[in-house]
Image (spheres, coloured by chain):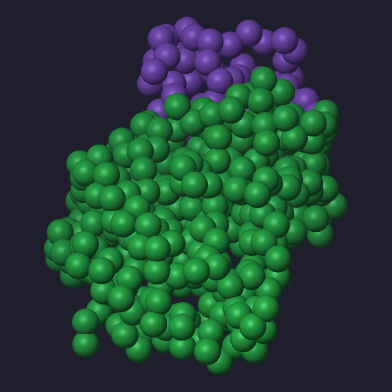
Amino acid sequence: MKFVENQPSDDTLDLVCRVCPLHLLEPGDKLNCLKKGQVLEVLTDYDGALEDIPNWCQKCGQEFIGIEEDDECYKLYIRKNK
Amino acid sequence: MKRVYMDHASATPVRKEVIEAMLPYFDEHFGNPSTVYDMGSKIKQVIEEQRAKVAKLIGAKAEEIIFTSSGAEANNLAIKGAALARQKKGKHIIISAIEHHSVLNSARFLERMDFEVTYLQVDENGLVDPKRLSAAIRPETILVSIMHANNEIGTIEPIPELSAICRERGVIFHTDAVATVGNIPVDVNELNVDLLSLSGASLGAPKGVGALYFRDNLRLMPLIHSGIQERGRRGGTENVPAIVALGKASELAAKELPDKVNYARGLRDLLVAGVHERIEQVKYTGHPKKRLPGHASFCIEAIEGEALIFMLNQSGIYANTGSACASKALKTSPVLVAIGIPPDLAQGSVVFTLSSSNTVEEMEYVLEKLPLAVDKLRALSPVWRTKSAA
């Protein structure tokens, strides 16, 4: 697991309180709206996403940058590769 | 016997166009919208079209609408969902003292979970004072819920003023618009609300469908946990026929609303003037001007509202004593208590809610039968006899 701090992002997807498997469906839609090289921040309070999202990035050919945790939720960062 | 239905706040007849629109989704198009084959994906598309129609009726974006099983569920999701999603920020919420049971009891449920609730008092017309709201907001306040209009007394609350206070203080604002959507123009941007509940039953759709508007991807803890339906915010396979009905009813309401408002107001004014002319010792409850166009509510001295409803029923007239949910409880209406109606007068509550299907002839019929029923009940009333003798 790679941790990051103060990672800048171009857009945010708030999935706090949203149930599984939304964390695997919504990032793809959101990345479609970004340009190659831009970074998406995904907010979630679902522990399973910490494993699922890096795996999903690998399968989809997107770059998983890392995770930051704050009091409220996890922040996961994905760079659009294609 | 003639049937004069004047209880549209409790339920509306389902429009023929609405029934026709929903019928194919019971048999021909019965597939599950979450399936990937075309029988499902086409239905998913139909649901999204209905979402856009409901959104258009209230000036929202399609993605800001969650379908629910009722206005009550929408209120539950708004109150519990918004509060539970924000409890780390604070555990204080504010509602008015005249909210519908679905808001009131959601707030009471949160009290059991260590939330604190302030119940804002209203004035003699049922209006919430913006200054009183402002004074009640604390640093730990996370949610305010004030209904758009009250179903028992018809008063329309000053929502833009109230929501502006909350916006400025960073507090989420919800309004229960079950009594207004379909009866007056409702625009979420003009009202400046974060959450708004509506019901199909008051819109010409069947009972068992409603919707919640939520602004800008606002965080909501789901009440029904399941899968991907409603994008994870409200689980359970969608009630497709009911959703189609709500979409069609919303489309019709958007077209017909201006005429309906003027028509219902005209009938209401006729009824109110006739009641004052023909029955003595009657109090018209709620705000005299800032009220729903088809709504006339009275407290009639020295009668039991329940008895009056049964007598009107014998003449084929259908009205109510208050809200449909509360009228069987044999308890003085908390709404009437909140506006300062004495308990004995509150017993004589009767509410008429009119719609486009009502006619001038029906108002004349009611104005003929209502005074007779009141006279009969008063003749049996020792309270009335004492007052008359004095």
Residue at 25% from the left image edge and 69% from the top image edge: B364
| Furthest-bottom residue in this view | B380
* x and y percentages locating residue B359 in the rendered image: 21, 63
Query: Which tint was used for chain A?
Result: purple
From this view, report whether residue B19 is shown above or below residue B193. below
State the count of labels.
Answer: 0
In which quadrant is the C terminus of chain B drawn? Answer: bottom right
Is A37 displayed left or right of B50 in the figure?
Answer: right
Which of the 4 image quarters holds residue B140? Answer: top right
Is B252 displayed left or right of B383 in the figure?
Answer: left
Which of the 4 image quarters holds residue B301? Answer: bottom right
* x and y percentages locating residue B373 in the rendered image: 42, 83
Residue at 33% from the left image edge and 71% from the top image edge: B367
* x and y percentages locating residue B277 in the rendered image: 40, 63
In which quadrant is the N terminus of chain B drawn? Answer: bottom left
Which of the 4 image quarters holds residue B267? Answer: bottom left
Which of the two residues, B332 or B368, is positioned nearer the viewer here?
A: B368
Does residue B250 appear in this view? no
Residue at 21% from the left image edge and 62% from the top image edge: B360
Which of the two residues, B335 or B138, is positioned nearer the viewer here?
A: B335
Residue at 37% from the left image edge and 48% from the top image edge: B293
Is A59 displayed left or right of B301 in the figure?
Answer: left
Does residue B128 appear in this view? yes
| Furthest-front residue in this view | B390
Query: Which tint was used for chain B?
Result: green
* x and y percentages locating residue B147 in the rendered image: 56, 46
From this view, report whether residue B210 is shown above or below residue B157. below
From this view, report whether residue A24 is shown above or below residue B300. above
Which of the two residues, B323 or A59, is positioned nearer the viewer here?
A: B323
Which of the two residues, B357 or B252, is positioned nearer the viewer here?
A: B357
